[in-house]
Amino acid sequence: MGKKILLEHINVPGINTLEVYRQNGGYASVEKALKTMAPDAIVEEVKKSGLRGRGGAGFPTGMKWSFLAKPEGVERYLVVNADESEPGTFKDRYLMEKIPHILLEGMITSSFALGAKTSCIYIRGEYFYVSRILEAAIEEAYAAGLLGKNILGTNFSHDIFVQVGAGAYICGEETALLESLEGKRGNPRIKPPFPAVAGLYGCPTVVNNVETIASVPYIVMNGGDDYAKIGIGRSTGTKLISASGHINKPGVYEIEMGITVEDFIYSEEYCGGILNGKKLKAVVAGGSSVPILPADLILKTEKGEPRLMSYESLSDGGFATGTMLGSGGFMVYDETTSIVKNLYTFARFYHHESCGQCSPCREGTGWMEKILHRIVEGHGKHGDTDLLWDIQRKIEGNTICPLGDAAAWPVASAIRHFRAEFEEYINHPERIKEVKHLQELVS
Amino acid sequence: MSKEIKFNEETLTLINKIINRYPVGKQKSALLPVLHIAQAEFDGWLSPETMEYVASLLNIKPIEVFEVATFYSMYNLKPVGKCILEVCRTSSCWSRGSEDIVQHLEKKLGIKAGETTKDGMFTIKTVECLGSCGGAPMLQCGAAFHENLTIEKVNSIVENYRYEGKRKSYTDLDYKNTL
């Protein structure tokens, strides 16, 4: 069993309540931080920990915090990004539903470090029931003097509220999230200025993922150096992985970074192997936006080394032969899966979710969906694969926010690694219906 | 079916509580939550009258409400069934059989995805990833997530909703029961 930080007490009955959470050491970091630490000392510990943003980008959290502008007399905000909408990702939902107080504890401690009087959890609208769980937990925290005025008798006062979204993947992008929080359409802002300078209501704002903030209590209690010893290299700590698709045990697993991908897929502790004893065909390791890899490349790098669950190992080989850890949305596909059809579901998703601000993304995502639709329906044209390649190239890097890249990468990687399958669809549409094992047929 | 577009006192108190979360003058921040409440209270969709009413409550222009209501997928801009069966169809749900679930629902209810049954009870809606990939295939109805669907499970879900006969909204969960 690897080290558990976030899910250590997941199976304790009643861990969702304040009472049981505190019996298991909960809120100790609030006590320690507010009573014995200076705000900047907490930022230093987070820097030392090497904690990186768990929403997908992997940006160093301590560094993000140190960018926060601190003009006199201006409010600062901490906004927790619980808009979890990246296909394949459901870890934050699990954490908030099962242990809501770990997030609140992290928010209070982090807000103290940042000097924020108010913080907010922006949660995707579809998670309405989770928002109610969080609100109930917040109510408990106020009643216990852990929120509100003069927390635990100190000078620090803090308020937390929950804001529900209304169905828009783009609001997971931090500036779109802030727009949405201000009651507007979720159109990403042009940066700079970054939220650290001009965020919510134009005030300095830190936006962090749920899992990131929930990792802060451990760092405050045990020190950044201790946290940095967990994991491997620059991938410090643990990571929540959402495992889904053709595996025996879908679910959320906390892993210590550095375990092998093979172990994660096949061991009983995690995914428990491929469903119905089938063979592994491909994996999308970090949410729909990251490149898909065929079985041989997800299990071993191009150099033949075992692929590890870490930021560095998963991206080893660049996009030619590697991928990204991303949000940890780990989707597994067995040998019967049509990569083209799966890609069509991604393309449809990105077209649906494009905010429409930038032409390459607005037009390109729709175009790619349309082409993929005709291919999977058996009406693909010669040259369609090249056309798709061309379109994704013209989207990537040409948009205000990363949604354009996110829409391009799945298409690029599917063509890069499974080009023959596209051609099979286009050249032999009559076989589509009967073919189950496309990979076997074309290899 | 149509009633006067006006919240009762209890709802207005709740809305004021929401507005008070934000700094003075930033009441527009309450727009998304208030639209959810309006949709739940006024027949499950946002009519132009409802949107104008919300605009007046928040002291913003109707166009500011329209542009938001048309952006987010959870707001319905035309009448819908009492129970909207929202079936996820993105990758993991697709690979675990969401197409069969949609087909079965279409056959069972005699409508296509996007349509509403004649009795106004059900609407089938296909949606993109709802963050329930570990429980694929899944559907959402109101606040409830129904996971690890099978044809039998779908049948009993539909029958239960039909028996209850109530409108299901995202907002209608009593959170106190969750602790």
Image (cartoon, rainbow, N blue to C red):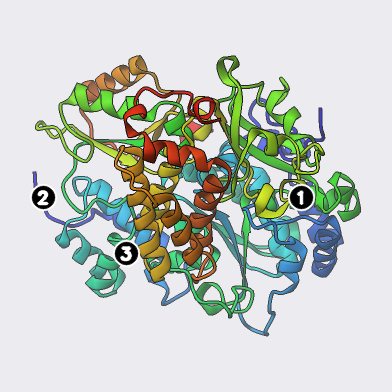
Q: Which residue is mark 2?
A: B3
Secondary structure beneath label 2: loop
Q: Quadrant of the C terminus of chain B?
A: top right
Image height check: is A76 above or below A158? below
Share a chain, discs 1 and 2? no
Residue at the image position 51 percent from the left and 77 percent from the top: A190
Horizontal and vertical percent for residue A186? 42, 64
Camera-side residue: B49 or A406? A406
Q: Which residue is mark 3?
A: B68
Q: Are marks 3 and 2 in contact (CB under 8 Å)?
A: no
Please name the amino acid that badge 1 sits on: Pro
Residue A217 - label: 1
Question: How far is the residue under mark 3 from the one under mark 1?
Answer: 37 Å
Residue at the image position 41 percent from the left and 30 percent from the top: B138
Q: Residues within 10 Å of mark 2 (few under 14, many from 20)?
A: few
Horizontal and vertical percent for residue A12? 69, 26
Q: Residues within 10 Å of mark 1 (few under 14, many from 20)?
A: many
Nearer the camera: disc 3 or disc 2: 3
Share a chain, discs 3 and 1? no
Please name the amino acid that badge 3 sits on: Val
Question: How far is the residue under mark 1 from the one under mark 2?
Answer: 50 Å
Report whether B128 appears left or right of A264. left
Report whether B160 appears left or right of A418. left
Nearer the camera: disc 1 or disc 2: 1
Please name the amino acid that badge 2 sits on: Lys
Question: How far is the residue under mark 3 from the one under mark 2?
Answer: 24 Å
Q: Are marks 3 and 1 in contact (CB under 8 Å)?
A: no
Quarter of the figure with residue A342: top left
Quarter of the figure with residue A259: top right
Secondary structure beneath label 3: helix
Camera-side residue: A333 or A159? A333
